[in-house]
Image: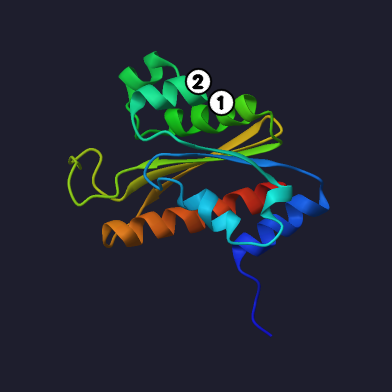
């Protein structure tokens, strides 16, 4: 028998604990939500999904402060934290996962190179942010970010 995928494990644990999840995505552009939706039963747990690709959307939909975006930029630990916490509040869900970063191939700087990604997760008010330094194509960086986001959410819930 094939091992369960992380998206299946996440949906199962959310169902078992009667919890809901929301996604707030920038570089992943909805892939986290789509990966959750690939699982039968996702409609029981996925409450809302926000694609906040530009700074204005991060502020409007997830409540990321304009000060945070100016001071730390969109690709930062602080922004990922506010995206997760704001998404959880906006959707009134138990869990929210966020992803912001640079998938490339352009846009990186020496201080913040392509492949820099911040994954945030807030579970009932407790927030954790992971900083990743990924390599590969744009698609590979985005897919690795989705995997990391699902893993972090699962780990925080269990």
Q: How did the renderer colour the structure? A: rainbow
Residue at the extreme bottom of the image, as rendered: 1
Residue under numbered circle 2: 63
Mark 2 surroundings within 10 Å by alpha-carbon count, few (fewer than 14), some (14 through 19), many (20 or more):
some
Residue 64 visible, this angle? no
Q: Residue at x 65, y 53 (%)?
A: 154
Q: Mark 2–mark 1 contact, CB under 8 Å?
A: yes
Q: Residue 95: image x %, image y %?
A: 66, 39
Residue ID at (40%, 39%) = 26
Rendered image quadrant of residue 52: top left
Task: Measuring from the top left, give residue 146's x and y in whole percent.
Answer: 47, 54
* Residue 44 can be seen in this image: yes
Q: Is residue 5 left or right of residue 133?
A: right
Residue farthest to the top? Answer: 67
Up/down of 101 relative to 93, above or below: below
- Secondary structure of the residue carrying tag 1 is helix
Tag on residue 86?
1
Say few, some or many: other residues with alpha carbon within 10 Å of mark 1 (under 14 / 14 to 19 / 20 or more).
Answer: many
Q: Nearer the viewer, residue 70 or 4?
A: 4
* Residue visible at 51% across and 51% down in the picture: 32
Q: Secondary structure at mark 2?
A: loop
Q: Quadrant of the N terminus?
A: bottom right
> Relative to residue 54, is residue 145 depicted above or below?
below
Residue 69 sits in quarter: top left
| Image point (57%, 30%), residue name | 87
Label 2, label 1: how far apart the Cα atoms are: 5 Å
> Disc count in the image?
2
């Amino acid at each position: 028998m094939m091992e369960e995928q992380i998206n299946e494990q996440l949906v199962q644990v959310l169902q078992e604990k009667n919890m809901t999840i929301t996604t707030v995505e920038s570089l992943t552009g909805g892939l986290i939500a789509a990966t959750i939706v690939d699982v039968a039963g996702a409609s029981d747990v996925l409450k809302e999904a926000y694609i906040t690709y530009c700074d204005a959307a991060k502020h409007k939909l997830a409540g990321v402060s304009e000060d945070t975006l100016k001071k730390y930029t969109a690709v930062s630990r602080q922004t990922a934290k506010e995206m997760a916490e704001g998404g959880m509040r906006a959707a009134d869900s138990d869990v929210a996962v966020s992803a912001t970063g640079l998938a490339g191939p352009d846009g990186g700087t020496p201080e913040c190179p392509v492949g820099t990604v911040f994954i945030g997760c807030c579970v009932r008010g407790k927030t954790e942010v992971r900083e990743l330094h990924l390599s590969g194509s744009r698609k590979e960086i985005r897919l690795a970010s989705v995997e990391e986001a699902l893993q972090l959410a699962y780990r925080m819930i269990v």
